[in-house]
Amino acid sequence: METSPLDTNFWNDLYQHQETRWDIGRVSDPLNAWFDQLTNKDLALLIPGCGNSHEAEYLLQQGFTNITLIDISSLLTAALEKKFSQYIGKQLTIITGDFFDLQGRFDMIIEQTFFCALLPALRPAYVEKMYSLLKPGGRLAGVLFNRSFEGGPPFGGSKEEYLSLFSSRFTIKTMEPCYNSIGPRVGAELFICLCLNHDLLDFED
């Protein structure tokens, strides 16, 4: 699927110049709290548009065994392969490519600043692709911006928009303001937990 002008060259250039200004340098507090209550460490996890992969680093440190990362930036994924070399082919798979071309099935997909990096016109396709990648009972969980931005990326949005967008394919288990956002993002983030159906996997809430 065409994502121009936010293509490989665009993202390679941003990472080369370290201009991913939404990267806070660590796992965000809402996701950290979510990860800490997951008890099944063998879940097949996907982190699309993985960026610098602070989330994957934390999950690996906590003993999770089946993590897949995908990003369109070849510069970034080359750096990740070097950083995570001890895990590749074991607990971790790194894919360079377009998320919309990805094949596979996952128990959980982690959303952290990927949705906001896509052109808004691709949001319906994002929903359909997420739906196709999740196993029955799987979840899409993470954080969405609940504010607007000038230009982009990142591109913002609102709870009302997201409810309308996701409800055709997902049961909305949680879509509420984050109670533990970092200072600059207080009041500007929503934590989401979206399920394919009501027959949920064995997660701990």
Image (spheres, grey):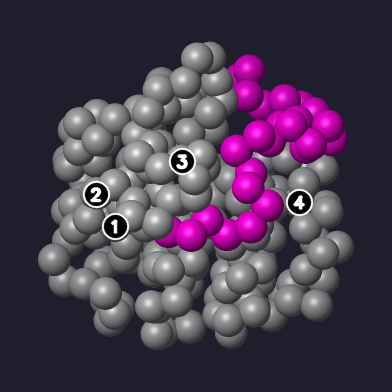
Identified by mark 1, the residue type is: Cys
Residue 198 coordinates in the image, percent (x, y):
13, 66
Mark seen at residue 175: 2
Which one is in front in this view, the residue at disc 1 or the one at disc 2?
2
Mark seen at residue 193: 1
Q: Secondary structure at mark 1?
A: strand
| Marked residue nearer the N-terminal end (4 or 3) | 4
Q: Main secondary structure of the magenta part?
A: loop
How packed mark 2 is, by other alpha carbons closer than 10 Å (few <14, some 14-19, many 20 or more), is: some
Q: Secondary structure at mark 3?
A: helix
Residue 164 coordinates in the image, percent (x, y):
18, 33
Magenta highlight range: 1-30
Q: Residue furthest front?
A: 183
Q: Is residue 181 left or right of residue 69?
A: left
Q: How far apart are the two marked residues, 4 and 2, measured between alpha carbons? A: 31 Å
Is 116 one of the magenta-colored residues? no
Q: How far apart are the two marked residues, 3 and 2, measured between alpha carbons? A: 16 Å
Q: How far apart are the two marked residues, 4 and 1, measured between alpha carbons? A: 27 Å
Residue 45 coordinates in the image, percent (x, y):
49, 67
Which one is in front in this view, the residue at disc 1 or the one at disc 3?
3
Query: Which residue matches tag 3?
Result: 185
Q: Residue furthest left?
A: 198
Query: Which residue matches tag 4?
Result: 77
Which one is in front in this view, the residue at disc 4 or the one at disc 3?
3
Q: Secondary structure at mark 2?
A: strand
Q: Are marks 1 and 2 in contact (CB under 8 Å)?
A: yes
How packed mark 4 is, by other alpha carbons closer than 10 Å (few <14, some 14-19, many 20 or more), is: many
Identified by mark 3, the residue type is: Arg
Q: How far apart are the two marked residues, 1 and 2, measured between alpha carbons? A: 7 Å
